């Protein structure tokens, strides 16, 4: 076991033990005895990037069925077993990984571990829940079929990554979901659910020995190695293009973006600071918010942020505004992106951006579920527990020179791939 201590409340105040179980699995453990609860979160490399193009949504459908019957329990029986011991369990499919969450009272850990073991080792994929979950996914797709935000997001990604899994909708389409058969689910589970790509975090009122026993019981019987298809790096396409999607609505939804620096780039953290100052999602002090909303009243919200995926990183932003003001909104946002790219930030912006990113970090660790989620996120990024402290130190170390260099590298000449849904004037 190796122990890592977050040194001060200004960083994260989380103590992480890296534990190796008797059966050779590794978990990150945070002990907290304030309430008699334990949260477990895990992730495995894979996700929607493994979906065949003609069966997009397979990973999401599989994840949605893992708690719909396993082992000797059919769907109703499995949910009754969860309810009897107040066990919360869910599974999810992201672009690059599958994940799961379990939370329960410490007195019910044995039963919770057994149910989690069944879900990941022996999912049933019975016909009734298979059709029901697929129907639910279809209903959701029909519901958002003419949603401007959904259309803009899907079209933008399809244009940005036309020959890559990132260009496929992670939740599929009516056509691709219809092609999925039960055998596809069984094959996907056997191919992807394994120990070699497994990351685990346990948080709560539990010691090292019991946490190791919990993890071994749930996961140690999985196959040693999965069989995932290789996924290439995502080449970004369409930079400078504007894609118009006609929709008879009074407002235009605009989405724009461009390739960005990868997580392992020396300038990545500095570029994150620049992106936050430019368009930080949820920030009411960003440049885009100030120029688009406060000064001109063009839109209610506007954002811009980085998405760092396993095989590619990109800047992505957008806004929604009246059709007659769409072009002006886009031009103002584009001008700010170009200005940051060419001229960087000023001292006040840099300091405020760093202060926000450092000061808001502890909010990601204020519940056991959030802590577990963040520990998995750090593992997925390939970082050690020391990142809990190092992350803020790196942000503190960003200088005017490094942030201007990073902004220029990340935003280039400011050119964008843009999708506009609606009937915008001026495009």
Image: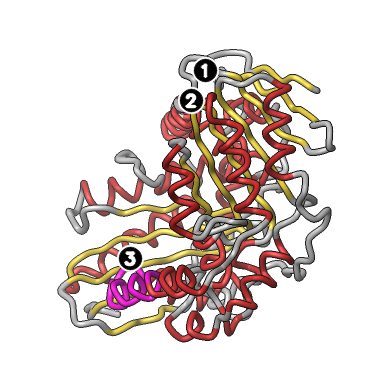
Residue at image location 79% in from the left, 38% down from the top: 25
Q: Quadrant of residue 223?
A: bottom right
Q: Label 1 belongs to which residue? A: 10
Q: Is residue 4 above or below residue 242?
A: above
Could you tell me residue 396's position as x and y percent? Answer: 58, 26
At numbered mark 1, what does the secondary structure look like: helix, strand or loop? loop
User: Is residue 82 toward the left or the right of residue 199 in the image?
Assistant: left
- The CA span between labels 2 and 1 is 7 Å
Sequence-earlier tag: 2 or 1:
1
Please state which of the two labelled residues, at mark 1 or mark 3, is closer to the viewer: 1
Q: Is residue 76 above or below residue 272?
A: below
Q: Nearer the viewer, residue 84 or 164?
A: 84
Residue at image location 53% in from the left, 70% down from the top: 126
Q: Are marks 2 and 1 in contact (CB under 8 Å)?
A: yes
Q: Label 3 belongs to which residue? A: 331
Q: Label 2 belongs to which residue? A: 362
Residue at image location 28% in from the left, 73% down from the top: 143
Sequence-earlier tag: 1 or 3:
1
Q: Are marks 3 and 2 in contact (CB under 8 Å)?
A: no
Question: Magenta stretch?
Answer: 136-150
Q: Is 11 part of what is drawn in magenta?
A: no
């Amino acid at each position: 076991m190796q122990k890592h201590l977050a040194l001060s409340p200004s960083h994260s105040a989380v103590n992480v033990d890296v534990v190796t179980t008797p059966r050779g699995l590794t978990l990150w453990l945070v002990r907290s005895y304030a309430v008699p609860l334990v949260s477990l979160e895990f992730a495995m490399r894979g996700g929607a990037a493994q979906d065949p193009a003609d069966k997009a949504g397979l990973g999401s459908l599989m994840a949605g069925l893992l708690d719909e019957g396993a082992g000797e329990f059919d769907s109703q029986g499995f949910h009754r077993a969860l309810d009897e011991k107040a066990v919360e369990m869910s599974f999810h499919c992201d672009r690059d990984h599958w994940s799961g969450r379990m939370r329960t009272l410490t007195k019910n850990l044995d039963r919770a571990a057994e149910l989690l073991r069944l879900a990941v080792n022996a999912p049933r994929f019975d016909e009734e829940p298979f059709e029901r979950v697929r129907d639910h996914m279809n209903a959701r797709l029909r519901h958002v079929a003419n949603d401007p935000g959904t259309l803009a997001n899907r079209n933008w990604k399809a244009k940005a990554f036309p020959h890559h899994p990132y260009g496929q909708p992670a939740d599929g389409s009516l056509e691709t979901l219809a092609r999925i058969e039960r055998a596809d689910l069984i094959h996907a589970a056997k191919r992807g659910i394994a120990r070699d790509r497994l990351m685990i975090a346990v948080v709560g009122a539990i010691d090292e020995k019991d946490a190791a026993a919990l993890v071994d019981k749930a996961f140690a019987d999985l196959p040693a190695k999965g069989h995932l298809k290789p996924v290439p790096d995502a080449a970004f396409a369409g930079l400078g293009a504007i894609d118009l999607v006609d929709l008879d609505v009074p407002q235009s939804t605009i989405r724009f973006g461009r390739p960005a620096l990868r997580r392992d780039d020396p300038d990545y953290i500095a570029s994150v600071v620049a992106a936050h100052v430019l368009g930080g999602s949820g920030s009411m002090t960003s440049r885009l918010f100030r120029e688009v909303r406060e000064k001109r009243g063009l839109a209610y919200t506007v954002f811009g942020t980085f998405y760092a995926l396993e095989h590619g990183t990109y800047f992505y932003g957008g806004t929604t505004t009246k059709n007659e003001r769409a072009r002006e909104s886009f031009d103002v946002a584009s001008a700010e992106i170009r200005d940051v790219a060419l001229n960087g930030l000023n001292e006040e912006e840099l300091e405020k951006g760093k202060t926000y990113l450092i000061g808001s970090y502890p909010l990601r660790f204020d519940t056991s579920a959030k802590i577990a989620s963040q520990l998995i996120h750090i593992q997925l990024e390939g970082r050690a527990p020391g990142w809990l402290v190092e992350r803020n130190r790196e942000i503190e170390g960003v200088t005017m020179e490094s942030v201007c260099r990073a902004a220029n590298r990340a935003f280039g000449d400011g050119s964008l791939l843009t999708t506009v849904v609606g009937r915008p004037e001026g495009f």
